[in-house]
Image (spheres, grey):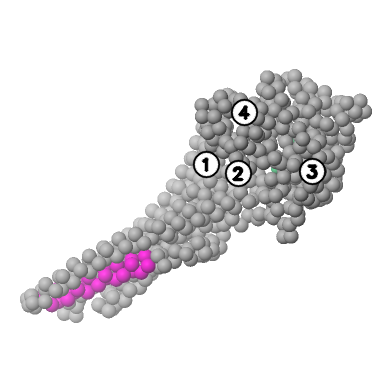
Amino acid sequence: MESEPKRGGLASIARLGPYLRPVRGRVIGSAVAVLCSMICGLTIPLVIQRILDGPVATGDTGGLVWLVAAVAALGATEAALFFTRRRLIAGPSTRVEANLRADLYAHLHRLPIAFHDQWQSGQLLSRAVSDLSTIRRFIAFAGIFLVVNTLTMVIGLGVLFFLDPVLGAITLACALPLIVICTRFESKYSVLSRRAQDQEGDLATTVEESALGIRVLKAFGRGPELARRFAAQARELRGTELAKVRVLALLWGAIIMLPELGIAAQLLVGSLGIANGTMTVGTLVAGITVAVFLRWPVDSIGWLLAETNQTATAAERYWEVRDAEVTITDPDSPKHLPADGAGLLRFEDVRFAYPSGAEVLAGVDLEVRPGETVALVGPTGSGKTTLTALVARLADVTGGRVTVDGVDVRDLPLAELRTAVATAFEEAVLFSASVAENVRLGAPEASDDDVRTALRIAQAEKFVDGLPWGLDTRIGEQGLSLSGGQRQRLALARAVVGRPKVLVLDDPLSALDVQTEAEVEHALRSVLSGVTALVVAHRPSTVQLADRVALLEGGRITAVGTHTELLAANPAYRALLSTLDNERTSV
Ligand SMILES: Nc1ncnc2c1ncn2[C@@H]1O[C@H](COP(=O)(O)OP(=O)(O)OP(=O)(O)O)[C@@H](O)[C@H]1O
């Protein structure tokens, strides 16, 4: 996942414009507040010059009280404006971050499964969390100070030249090399910065995978091995962070040394000027005060450029995800399912190839009649799961078409298609929410009665009623507090709650033990009655539930018939079934 930063980093920041537009008033207000506060700070040395060359030099203390009051007032205003900046910017920067995050999340949901197959979840996580907080920090702080500190440097140098051109020239002579050094270091730092951000994403993936697979890792005693891998990744990240520190340390050395040399030179030139009578004490003190005041704007430039760079990288990483193409979308001129359609599912010369591989499906023709259950069997890797994904458009065919009641699924609005077609997967994935919420994922508007009916059909009502809070019981991350059979039955309830016309199931029995299989088989029989269903079968018991069986081999359907017919007439089917039987008995 690692890549060098592209030249378009700043363009990536510029693309955040539409998010900033609604809050631009406050952002500009905050920049103006901090600039005014800097100007107040820069005015103080001019008043000090007046005090030293006026009342102090002449002994006439008449106007002293006003000049001192002016210093106090300027100081108070400087502080108040700084406070105003913080108050103005806090809301907008967090709002922009929240909006960017919400849009990223929505986009992740629109992206096809193919995208998620290719991207590590940790990479997505680090973009959604740490990259966005880098962008927020930039909006709230670095972005504003980069502009304001540059302006302050220009104004401060103007004041110095106004006080004494030699003092101005000395400060400028120190500031220019600093800016050159900062810019040179900036490109070095940006490479390291991108590397660290990518490595952080890889580390997040490892942590996430270990947390999700903790049972497997513990069961196989693989914890120490994973810990070693994690430690190696963490060491790599530490190495990159240390390299970043080394670059920054050199930068800071220059940042601190050059202004100090400048002040020493000012003192030398100023003292000689005072001795020769060409400069007043007030001018020298004011000049040094301005130079000291300019240290923060000058010092900060390197750091602010590094932050800008980090933000450019973060924005680039953010847009990488946002720019990923949503290939499965609503059609431009949608058609609708006929109101009297009974749920006829057809695959017509369907072809499919994964972007990375050869054609998995090479002309599948299959019809599942209304109300019928067809079991799809085939050798492992023959493309059964792939075929099921094409019905609800989790992926799109690369040739041919899939139709429901005569309408190509690509011509239907996605919402209509996914209401008409329900899909359940081999692994019953549940979310850390209540039982009712998990079932309602299949139909958000379903009433409590609908949920109960679905649970009844999926033979899950009894065990749900036995849970401490019934439908409202929270079932923990991935539903791990439930048994495998209970999880499968909840997943089946979720599939039927929206009363779909077509059910597509990847064998819900395949991962279950014999005892649990019987429970779920019973549920499945009830779920399948009266609905058009295509069921991938890995178990003979699933085949028994079907009206007809289709054999998928070499990317095509090579035989369709009842289980008995195929058993009698098709040697390939007989051979396949005996392997399923063997797997079954070895479970
Ligand atoms: N995301 C993917 N990218 C590339 N190739 C894939 C992807 N998913 C599956 N494949 C390949 O496509 C082929 C069909 O896979 P599929 O999972 O559809 O087979 P299957 O018949 O369901 O297998 P099984 O019975 O073992 O579950 C396999 O060769 C597999 O390696």
| Residue 24 x %, y % | 44, 66
Mark 1, Cα crowd under 10 Å, few <14 / some 14-19 / many 20+, is many
Q: CA distance from mark 2 to mark 1?
A: 35 Å
Which amino acid does the dot numbered 3 rest on?
Ala
Decide which of tag 4 and tag 2 comes sooner along the chain. Answer: 2
Label 1, secondary structure: give it: helix
Of label 2 and label 1, which has the lower sequence position? 1
The residue lying at 37 percent from left, 67 percent from top is 29
Q: In the rendered image, which quarter is residue 448 located in?
A: top right
Location of ligand 1 given as a quarter of the image: top right
- In this view of the protein, can residue 132 be seen by the observer? yes
- Residue 162 magenta-highlighted: no
Are circles 4 and 2 on residues that touch, CB within 8 Å?
A: no
| Residue at mark 2 | 444
Q: Is residue 452 left or right of residue 582?
A: left
Which region shows up in magenta? 29-55
- Front residue of 556/331: it is 331
What's the CA distance linking mark 4 and mark 2? 19 Å
| Labels in figure, total | 4
Q: Which residue is mark 1?
A: 203
Instruction: Name the residue located 56 percent from the left edge and 47 percent from the top edge.
Output: 124
User: Is residue 22 depicted above or below 387 in this figure?
Assistant: below
Q: Nearer the viewer, residue 437 or 307?
A: 437
Which residue does the image show at 58% across and 51% down from the upper left? 106
What's the residue type where badge 4 is placed?
Answer: Glu
Residue named by callout 3:
342
Which of labels 1 and 3 is toward the front?
A: 3
Q: Residue at x 85, y 47 (%)?
A: 349
User: Quarter-wise, where is residue 151 in the image?
Assistant: bottom left
